[in-house]
Amino acid sequence: MSQFFAQFDLTELIKSSIVLFAVIDVIGSVPMILRIKEQAGEIHPFRTAVVAFAIMIAFLIFGESILALFGVNIESFAVAGSILLFAMSAEMILGIDIFRDQVSGKTASIVPLAFPILAGAGSMTTLISLRAEYQLINILLSVVINLLFVYMVLRLTKRIETLLGEGGIAILKKVFGIILLAIAVKLFTSNVKELFQ
């Protein structure tokens, strides 16, 4: 256990937190969250955050074993993940919808909010990809930090939308889209060479 905590690295924590923040994109999802809230009547921030956390942690811990069942190594998944992140960054930068569906219902806090909007394919791919570069303790803490932030945003969604306005949210999406694109390129180049060795 002491060895586990000894692997803590502030730089890795900051980097992995920023990557997850860009992928989860809860600020950019504020208009969608408001639409879901309007359609479903209400959302439950704590329940949403807990379910998203459970999904992400489960995939972070067992995802590698699941991949092994299919004979896929971390590097291959990281390369595939980089392509998915590239598509997500294009979605954010160009303002197009690729992954997200419009749904409603009384279970909106779980589906689609917790999954797949927050803990969807992008988040899961990113977690496995991060495992190829960072220590587990740092990724776990970055998940906790991001889900605490998600919880606060869900509680303050209306105020955040009023504060940032449509222009502010659009700018944030572009900025984090570019960051995500750079991360996707780095992830691809650092792992693709491992496939040919």
Image: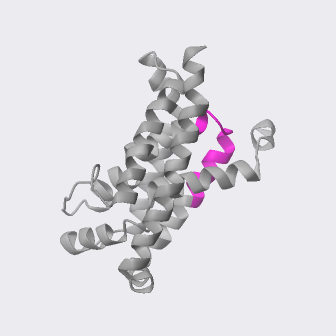
Image position of 157 with respect to 188: above or below? below
User: Is the stretch drawn in magenta largely helix, strand or loop?
Assistant: helix
Residue that extends furthest to the front in the rendered view of this protein? 94
Q: Name the foreground residue: 48 vs 180.
A: 180
Q: Position of residue 52 (x, y in %)?
A: 43, 53
Image position of 35 with respect to 68: above or below? below
Residue at the image position 22 percent from the left and 75 percent from the top: 38
- On the rendered image, what quadrant is the C terminus found in? top right
- On the rendered image, what quadrant is the N terminus found in? top right
Question: Which quadrant would residue 108 be assigned to in this image?
Answer: bottom left
Q: Is residue 12 left or right of residue 131?
A: right
Question: Which quadrant would residue 148 be assigned to in this image?
Answer: bottom right
- Tell me the colour scheme of the image: one colour
Residue at the image position 50 percent from the left and 56 percent from the top: 178
Image position of 79 with respect to 144: above or below? above
Residue at the image position 39 percent from the left and 71 percent from the top: 170
Q: Position of residue 84 (x, y in %)?
A: 40, 40
Is 143 magenta? The answer is: yes
Image position of 100 with respect to 197: above or below? below
The stretch of residues the image draws in magenta is 130-145
Res. 119 in view = no
Q: Position of residue 114 (x, y in %)?
A: 37, 55
Is 164 magenta? The answer is: no
Residue at the image position 43 percent from the left and 65 percent from the top: 173
Q: Position of residue 168 (x, y in %)?
A: 44, 77
Res. 21 in view = yes
Q: Name the foreground residue: 2 vs 70.
A: 70
Q: How many numbered marks have been drawn onto this rendered protein structure?
A: 0
